[in-house]
Every structure is written in C-alpha cells, then in structure tokens.
Amino acid sequence: MAMNIIAFLSCSNQQKRMSSEDVVNAHTTISDELEVPYVLAENYFVRNDFDETSLSTPKISSREEFDKIFGMATVMGDQGKPTPIDFTKQFAIAVISPADELAVKMKAVSLQKKEGHLLLRYKQDIGAKLSMKIQPFLLLVVDKKFDGQVAVEEEK
C-alpha cells in the first residue's frame, strides 16, 4: 500500500513539473503584444464647438469629458441609436481629424497592448471634394480591463 502511495505521488509531481515547463515554454513563444478587442462606436458626431487641438490624449475616461467632444446622431431604424458606452466599465479612444472639404473615412487597423500601453493603428481613405466641411473621426469603445496609456499611429 505504501508503495502505491509513493508511486502515485511521484507520478503526480512529475505531471505538475511537466505542466510548469509547458507553461514556461508557451509563455516564451507568445508575443508580448496582445490584440485588444473593441467596438466601433457609431451614430455620434464631433460637436461644432469642440476645438480638436484641446484633445490632449485620445483616451476618454468619463461621460463628462465625452459629452464635451461628441453629440448623439440618432437616426431612424434598427441601427439608429448611438453605440452605448458605460464609462464605469469602458473607455473610449478617439482620433479626430481637422474639419475639411474632403470625404475622409477613418478605419482602425489594429489595437494592441504592450507593456501596459495601448497602440491604435488606423488608416485614412481620402475621397472626393465635398461642398461642405466635415469633421472625420474614429471612435472605439474598449473594456477597462485593457486600460493603459493610449498612443495612435496613422498607417500610410
């Protein structure tokens, strides 16, 4: 009976040791960059009294701060409501281009976290000249579990 217990314990220890080694090996092969999930916020507009030079960081952490920059652009239909943002559980990342007469579409390429910092890579597609000025922007909603300083980088 004692031999059975010793054999069982040695097998158990060997399994734990192998699991630890597997974890270490897996950890070293995983990239330091983590893809961060996000939701593209829709049905908002940049307020016409907002000065884009006053946006010191692309990260928006409170409803009060958000409402100084964006208004709701509710339209009819099933998809007409603005994307809900719960600032107790989420934060927003905004990239705002200067107002222009060109049709500009902004698109998120990737959002990654590395060493506690978030990097948003985005792309702008510039279209035809318009008869009015528009304020292009990109607005993402991110879970606070991915919180960190945010930097943005435009891909050309």
Image (cartoon, grey):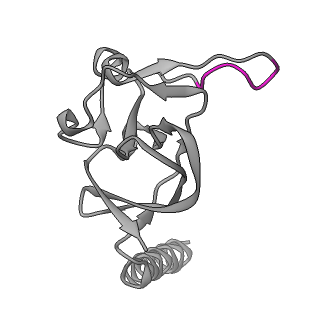
Which residue is outermost to the right? 77
Query: In which quadrant of the rendered view does residue 119 lie?
Result: bottom left
Q: State which quarter of the image contains the C terminus.
A: bottom left
Query: In which quadrant of the rendered view does residue 151 lie?
Result: bottom left
Task: Depth check: give the residue in front, 52 or 8.
Answer: 52
Position above or below: 44 against 6: above
Task: Depth check: give the residue in front, 3 or 11.
Answer: 11
Q: How far from the left and from the top, in percent, is residue 6?
A: 46, 77
Q: State which quarter of the image contains the N terminus.
A: bottom right
Is 122 on the left or on the right of 41, as rendered? left
Task: Depth check: give the residue in front, 38 or 69.
Answer: 69
> Is 66 covered by the magenta stretch?
no
Which residue is outermost to the front? 131
Position above or below: 11 against 40: below
Which residue corresponds to the image point at 50% horizontal and 78% vertical from the top-left? Answer: 15
Position above or below: 5 against 131: below
Which residue corresponds to the image point at 60% horizontal and 22% vertical from the top-left? Answer: 82
Q: Which residues are magenta?
A: 77-83
Which residue corresponds to the image point at 47% horizontal and 37% vertical from the top-left? Answer: 133
Dominant SS type (magenta): loop
